Amino acid sequence: MSAGMIFFWAVIIALGVLLYRALARPGGSSDRADNQPLEPTPEQILAERFARCEIDEDEYHRRLAALVKTTDEVPCPARH
């Protein structure tokens, strides 16, 4: 009888945890990778290069300004 009671409460707790996890996720998605873009943006790539010290601060700011200027004036055909 005590084994049955332990099993009963284990099932109840497991169902509660599963229900909480399903409701706590935005959109109810079971895969967190759905929220991330497939490809990094040009700004993210530039920031990563700066973080790895592949480019210096002046070059980073110059290229970032060029990216912002380009995206403000002409939309990139790859982005929709």
Image: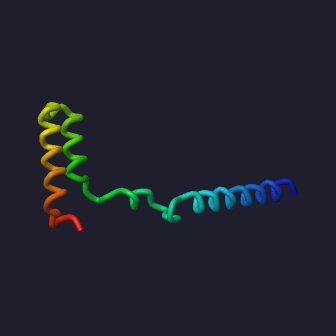
Q: Is residue 42 left or right of residue 14?
A: left
Judged from this view, the residue extending furthest toward the right is 1
Q: Is residue 38 left or right of residue 63?
A: right
Q: Is 23 rendered above or below residue 63?
A: below
Q: Is 19 rendered above or below residue 52?
A: below
Please identify the quadrant where the C terminus is shown.
Answer: bottom left
Q: Where residue 39 sits in the image (x, y, percent)?
A: 25, 57
Q: Where residue 26 sits in the image (x, y, percent)?
A: 51, 60
Of 22 and 70, the residue lying toward us: 70
Of 22 and 77, the residue lying toward us: 77
Q: What residue appears at the point 13 percent right and 55 percent down from the top-left corner?
A: 70
Q: What residue appears at the point 65 percent right and 56 percent down from the top-left corner?
A: 17
Of 50 and 12, the residue lying toward us: 50
Please identify the quadrant where the N terminus is shown.
Answer: bottom right
Q: What residue appears at the point 12 percent right and 40 percent down from the top-left corner?
A: 62
Describe the colour scheme in one phrase. rainbow
Q: Where residue 9 sits in the image (x, y, percent)?
A: 77, 56
Q: Where is residue 61, by image quadrant?
A: top left
Q: Where residue 25 sits in the image (x, y, percent)?
A: 53, 59
- Tag count: 0
Q: What residue appears at the point 25 percent right and 47 percent down from the top-left corner?
A: 44
Of 7 and 52, the residue lying toward us: 52
